Image: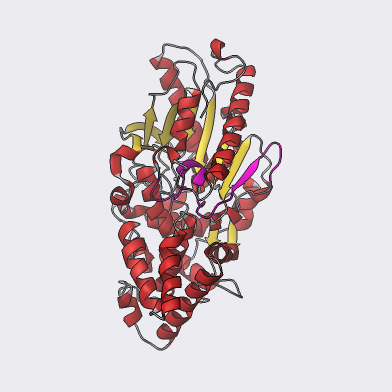
Amino acid sequence: MGFGSARAATAAAHLFGAAALLLMLARGGESVSFWLPPPSAGVGGEGFLGGASRYLTLDERWMNQTLDHFNPTDHRQFKQRYYEFLDYYRAPNGPIFLKICGEASCHGIGNDYLAVMAKKFGAAIVSPEHRYYGKSSPFDSLTTENLRFLSSKQALFDLAVFRQYYQETLNARYNRSGADSSWFVFGGSYAGALSAWFRLKFPHLTCGSLASSGVVLAVYNFTDFDKQIGDSAGPECKEALQEVTRLVDGQLQGGSNSVKQLFGAPKLENDGDFLYLLADAAAIAFQYGNPDVVCSPLIEAKKNGTDLVETFASYVKDYYIGKFGASVASYDQQYLKNTTPAVAESAYRLWWYQVCSEVAFFQVAPKNDSVRSPKIDTRYHLDLCRNVFGEEVYPDVFMTNLYYGGTRIAGSKIVFANGSQDPWRHASKQKSSEELPSYLIECKNCGHCSDLSGCPQAPSNIEGDSSKCSSPEALNKVRKQIVDHIDLWLSECQEQGHDKEPSLGSRWSIASI
């Protein structure tokens, strides 16, 4: 997901990983990534998010993981990085919280709201890094041929194998034989989708899952993303953003490249790449709960007759590239073709491969009333996929949704949570049912993974602090509902023979949040 896009997701992922969870989702952190990819600690993450104090642990652990789960004759393996946090663990019978790292490098276990819930339930937290991302790559070279093992399906089997491996590790540590803990899975953005899909495909391995901003619906032309940006911006800000787009389009149409220099992006020779950068820069403010940082200066400039393009350029350079840590180079298709990027920069190419081969999330301009340039269309995305990965890579969205069910996912004990201002929520399950409860957190700055990260979502807040939300009670209400579901589903796991804590009675939780 150019969570705005894959790139934003990556920067976000870097934000989240560093602090917590897909700008990537578009093109993608703790993982804020969905698309930019989600947050971890990567590009610009440490400065914006605050570094180690935002982690529960940074201690790396490793396991041997199977490269191809679908070919029993292929015995190749790779080293997969993971983290564990046991400070709150009520050993040996407490539950295990599996926090999925998404489309970004995983630098540790972030100190977000999951930590609060782990303390409440006496849970251990374990978090494996997604294959290919960060230090968990099977190959040194990320050629298209070598990327063929990068998929959500392979990642789900990684999680299943990891669960078995860690359960055995835990049993050995506490000298138990054959014990099976109560596991609960968590993820945000793309990792939120993985969380839902893991419960769907491996219901016997988890008591339930939380899909925070879980993008379970693969979308070919994701016009609702742009429409939500307009709705979240409000009439005045939306009009200002649209005027910026028209003015920039006009300058590019006239053959002037000076506007790229103004935004600090003169190396983006492809106009589509440059316009995608601008669209992501605008989207990120609403996706991660900082609407005023872009809207206030634009509205003020429009009232005062100040140059709107220059005002927006200052925002892009100071906030999106400066504080947020977005990489201008990552919008360059030539850059994305690099098959040996540094570990900190590999997420951009990796997430685009997942976009181009499986989920699309093509953030195209709607036919009418678009905020982004109409030049960002389906053809732009298909050309990018072909240019970067070759003719054989194409997102089979139909088959992805057929396999997982999209928003018609038929699993059970999966709770979905979305922020009202998050454009990614339109790829999530927003219709609630008894087996698949879904909650919308409604407030001015409730965006991507606000249930875990608090407000704003980037930078992430220690323990997911809700006090900066425009409506803290809205977030706290949904959090209580999430905790109630976890409480119930863990207790049902107990009744089915999983580890029990006799003093707890019928429920796991013993403290109020």
Residue at 34% from the left image edge and 41% from the top image edge: 107
* For residue 447, above or below residue 273: above
Please check the rendered image and state whether residue 456 is part of the magenta-colored stretch, yes or no. Answer: yes
The answer to whether residue 415 is above or below residue 245 is above
Q: Which residue is drawn at 42% across and 72% down?
A: 300
Question: Dividing the picture into quarters, in which one does residue 302 lie?
Answer: bottom left
* In the foreground, 55 or 252: 55
State whether residue 38 appears in this view: yes
Query: Which residue occupies the extreme front position in the image?
Result: 304
Work out which residue is located at the far right of the displayed protein and give it: 434
The total number of labels drawn is: 0
Residue depicted at x 44% and y 85%:
250
Seen from the viewer's position, the closer of residues 390 and 95 is 95
Location of residue 364 by image quarter: bottom right
Q: Where is residue 32 in the image (x, y as percent from the top left)?
A: 44, 49
Percent position of residue 450, x then y? 50, 46
Q: Position of residue 205 (x, y in %)?
A: 56, 28
Residue 447, x across and y down, in percent:
51, 52
| Secondary structure predominantly adopted by residues drawn in magenta | loop
Quarter location, residue 492: top right
Is residue 334 rendered magenta in the image?
no
Which color scheme does this rendered protein use? Answer: secondary structure
Is residue 165 in view from this perspective?
no
Q: Which region shows up in magenta?
A: 432-460
In the displayed structure, would residue 193 be above or below residue 143? above
Would you say 395 lies left or right of 412 here? left
